[in-house]
Image (cartoon, rainbow, N blue to C red):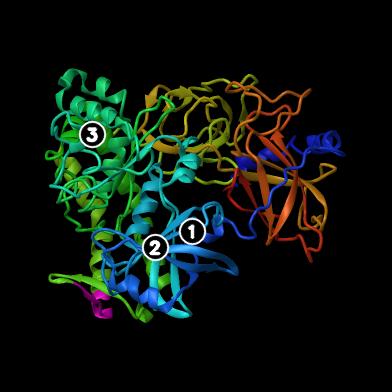
Amino acid sequence: MSQLASRFRDGLLATAAIVVSTILPGGRVWAGDPPAHSLNEFFDSSVLQRIDLRMDPAEWTLLHDKYLESTYYRCNFEWRGIVVASAGVKSRGTGSRNPIKPALGIDFSKFVSAQRFLGLKSIVLRNLAQDPTGAHEMVTEKMFARLGLPYSREAHVRLYVNDTYAGVYVLVEPFDERFLSTRFDESDGYLFEVTRTGDPYHFESLGSDPSLYVPAYFDPKTHSSNPDSAWLVNLIQLINSAPDSEFATSVGRYLDLEAFVTHLAVEQFMADWDGFLGELGMNNTYFYRRVKDRPALFLLWDKDGAMYGVDYSIWFNTNSNVLARRALAVPALRQRYMETIESAATAAGGPRGWMEQEFTRVVSLIHDSIREDPYLVCMHPDGYGPCTIAEVDALVDYTYQFLRGRSAFVRAELSSAGFTPAPRLLQPTAATNAASGEAVLVPGSLALLNAPIPFSDTPVQAPYPFPKELQGQQVMVAGQAAPIIRMAGQSILFQVPAEAPAGPMPIKFQSSGIAGNPLMVELRPARGGIFVATHADGTEITATHPASAGEIIVLYGTGFGKGKKDLATGEAAPLTELIELKQAITAIAGESPAEVLWAGLAPGYVGLHQIVLRLPDGLTSASRLTLTLASDGEPAVPFVLP
């Protein structure tokens, strides 16, 4: 936690005893049954996970033999002692299907409709057939995350089937109703997979008949019986026919063009030959039409085709695709595209920069398991076949060439295109949750903006109501000026506008009239972080004054969701009324559920949340105990008690 964020300890502690005495006895208790392990642990990419499937051996053989079919077979799924009986497993994928090491889809609800695992209806297990290094997709996903775009959680796993090692897989969080709800605060929008089942498609008009587009190129994953194809056809016609002078305004009402060119820029920086601008037409992308009067978005998927070559042009196929060509013809969008590529180059770094370090971390994590993989498979000119370790090592070496030279190559291309960047006032991931430090924000929450401009070593506390400009500094999120609370050093503490929608949103910073480079930041309905924990009497929990088993403690954090009573941006929670959070808050202490007694807005504060919980009885020690809270099942960033 930064020094500026840690100053929230001052003044917080006195309210703890007041809230506890108000809600106890007889306060509301959320009856939850949180799992003993959280999604954070399941998708922990720093750990090589283990998943066990147990099924009829004959059906496992049949799944291999009929790998081109998508037949589900019954299996028992197990992870860290949690067993889900009668789950469904099938061969899945398009170009990655092969009989040696099939990619797998696990549907926990296939045979038991209400069955879930850690709240998940299904998961995807990628087989690494198109990337034997096993690292291209994960590094690309994390680059998208660093540039503020929605992404799927991922982790590597050793898969065992009937106690026999079946190889290394990448575990992927799928796009489904849960994903949509936790990223966009809605689950009833129109989700399409952009497919390549027909001839290569580049957003050109094929006519007015919806059947020419759906499902051939846009396969509906929600509302499959009524995908409202007419809306999609109207958008495609508009993309093709809108006058140049009206393109950004007309199309921008239906499609988030700023997010689109940001997505395009990251994908092109990562040199993905099989993505939106793929060599064989659009592929490996999802399209989501929101229903809350928000423009539609593209979502990344299946990035094992990334890192194709260090000299892969950032302009590759941009003229072949109608949407890309017309969007990049708009000066402001073209500038944003190039700004984002420059930001990606900054985030990646050069030799031994972040991207190379992340690739090395992933390869080191799975190195031995790749070499032990009995079904390691590669794509050869004549199709899939067994892969040798020498082939894997050669691809790893090739990837290092990409990592060490990519940023310099794209900067040379930008220079050749006459690119003039705005003043770089913000680095990638400059905006973070003020408590957790994670680069995911929540409407109404507290956030930190780090800018390479020294403000003052002495914190400047803004007067209440907090101004939307302080000493010439202004922060804009989703087009709205954010209330500034404090400034110190190179950090600004501000509140994310409560009215801002979830999804990828632009963040801009202006200092003394100088507008800096724009960035994208991901906003979610909830992704909480904790500042500090106290005893019920308001004294801070420390190593010398630790918590104990069965004790009631109070947590102060931000980003856990919205209150049941709406507050305007910059408005403090009232001192005379306790406002609960809309989301049901659950907690896990170590391996055991903790009882959440109350969760709501901290009285007298802006953007601050207060959570009262009872630690489980029977703990041998509460010191260094990890607390994982969740908002409606979506985990917060873990917090470790002193």
Amino acid at the residue labelled 2: Tyr
- Do callouts 2 and 1 mark residues in contact (Cβ within 8 Å)? yes
Alpha carbon separation for disc pair 1 and 3: 57 Å
Quarter of image, res 69: bottom left
The residue carrying pointer 3 sits among few (fewer than 14), some (14 to 19) or many (20 or more) residues within 10 Å by Cα, namely few
Other-residue count near label 1 (Cα within 10 Å), few / some / many at <14 / 14–19 / ≥20: some
Q: Percent position (x, y) of residue 207?
A: 13, 30
Task: Look at the picture and state if 6 lies above or below 136.
Answer: above
Other residues around mark 2 within 10 Å, as few (<14) / some (14–19) / many (≥20)? some
Q: Nearer the viewer, residue 468 or 215?
A: 215
Which residue is drawn at the image coordinates 34% and 32% (left, top)? 296
Is residue 537 magenta-colored? no
Q: Amino acid at mark 1?
A: Phe
- The residue beneath circle 2 is 72
Identify residue for label 1: 111
Regarding residue 347, the answer to whether it shows in the image is: yes
Mark 1 vs 3, N-terminal side: 1
Secondary structure under the numbered disc 1 in the rendered image: loop
Q: Position of residue 451 (x, y in %)?
A: 46, 37
Distance from the alpha carbon under mark 2 to that under mark 1: 9 Å
Q: Magenta segment, which residues?
A: 384-393
Label 2's element?
loop
Q: Earlier in the sequence, mark 3 or mark 2?
A: 2
| Image coords of residue 519 (percent x, y) | 38, 36
Residue 367 in view: no
Q: Closer to the N terminus: mark 2 or mark 1?
A: 2
Closer to the eye: label 1 or 3: 1
Question: Label 3, on which residue?
Answer: 420
Q: Measure how far apart labels 3 and 2 are at the Cα level.
A: 54 Å
| Relative horizontal placement of residue 125, taking residue 600 as reference (left or right) | left
Q: Is residue 385 magenta?
A: yes
